[in-house]
Image (tube, rainbow, N blue to C red):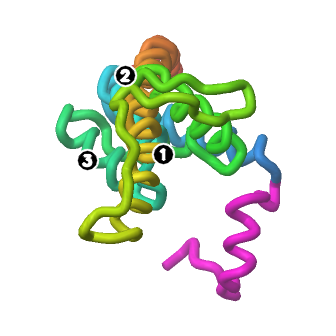
Amino acid sequence: MVFKRRNKRKTLRNLKEFFLPEKGWRRALEYLSHRIRRLPDTPHRIALGLGCGVLASFTPFFGLHFLVGALLAYIVRANIFAAILGTFFGNPITFPFMVAISIRIGNLVLGKVIEPGGKIISNSWGQETGLSSFGIFKDFLLKVYSENFIPYALGGLICGFLMAFIIYFLSKPLIFTYQRRKRRRHGQ
C-alpha cells in the first residue's frame, strides 16, 4: 500500500494519539472538515449523515457509535461516511458534558427531582426495590438500569435529535456553497 507506515505504531502510542493528537486538535478538526467537504454526494445526504452521526454519539452505547451512526445513515439513506465522521462530535472532551446533560434531561422527563448536589430525591414510579427471589444482583441491575441507563438513553435521544437538527441545518448550506464554488472553479 502506498500510504502505509514504515514502522508500525505501538498500541499505547495509538491510545495516546486518540486523546492527544500529535499535530493538535485544531489540525485534526481541519482534517475532518476537509474530508466532509470533499465527499462526493449531495449536500442533503452529507448533512443528514452528519446529523445521524451526532445523534449516535449521544447514545449510551459507548464503543458502538460508529455502527449506530452507520446504521442510522443506512436507514434514512444518508451518507454513511459522513455519519461516521459525525460521531466524532462525541470525543473525550465533549463526552462528560453530553452525559451529564443527557442524564439530567432524562431524569427531568421521567419526573425525578434532583438536588443541586446530584442526589435523586423522589422517583415518579413510587416504588423501592427490596430483596426479591433473584437476590441482590437483580436489585443492583435494576437500580443501575433505572437510575442511569434509562435517563441517559432518554435524555440522549432528546439532546441527540436536537443537535442532529442543528448540525443538519448548519452544515447543509455550507456544503452546498462549497460544492458550488468547487464546480465553478473547475469549470463544470
Q: Is residue 8 magenta?
A: yes
The crowd level at tag 1 (other Cα within 10 Å; few <14, some 14-19, many 20+) is some
In the image, 130 versus 180, the foreground residue is: 130
Q: Position of residue 93 (x, y in %)?
A: 72, 44
Q: Classify residue 14 by image quadrant.
A: bottom right
Tag in front: 3 or 2: 3
Task: Name the residue rendered at 73%, 59% in the picture.
Answer: 19
Q: Position of residue 17 (x, y in %)?
A: 73, 65
Which quadrant of the figure contains the C terminus? top left
Residue receiving disc 2? 43
Q: CB atoms at circles 3 and 2 under 8 Å apart?
A: no
Residue receiving disc 3? 71
Q: Secondary structure at mark 1?
A: helix
Tag in front: 1 or 2: 1
Identify the disc placed on residue 148.
1
Q: Position of residue 187 (x, y in %)?
A: 44, 20
Evaluate whether residue 115 shows in this view.
yes
Task: Name the residue rendered at 74%, 77% in the picture.
Answer: 13
Identify the disc placed on residue 187.
none
Instruction: Tell me which label, 3 or 2, sits earlier in the chain.
Output: 2
Q: Is residue 114 above or below residue 6?
A: above
Q: Is residue 83 above or below residue 14?
A: above
User: Callout 2, which amino acid?
Assistant: Pro
Main SS, magenta residues = loop
Evaluate whether residue 177 shows in this view.
no
Q: CA distance from mark 3 to mark 2?
A: 19 Å
In the image, 131 versus 25, the foreground residue is: 131
Magenta part of the protein: which range? 1-23
Instruction: Tell me which label, 1 or 3, sits earlier in the chain.
Output: 3
User: Callout 1, which amino acid?
Assistant: Asn
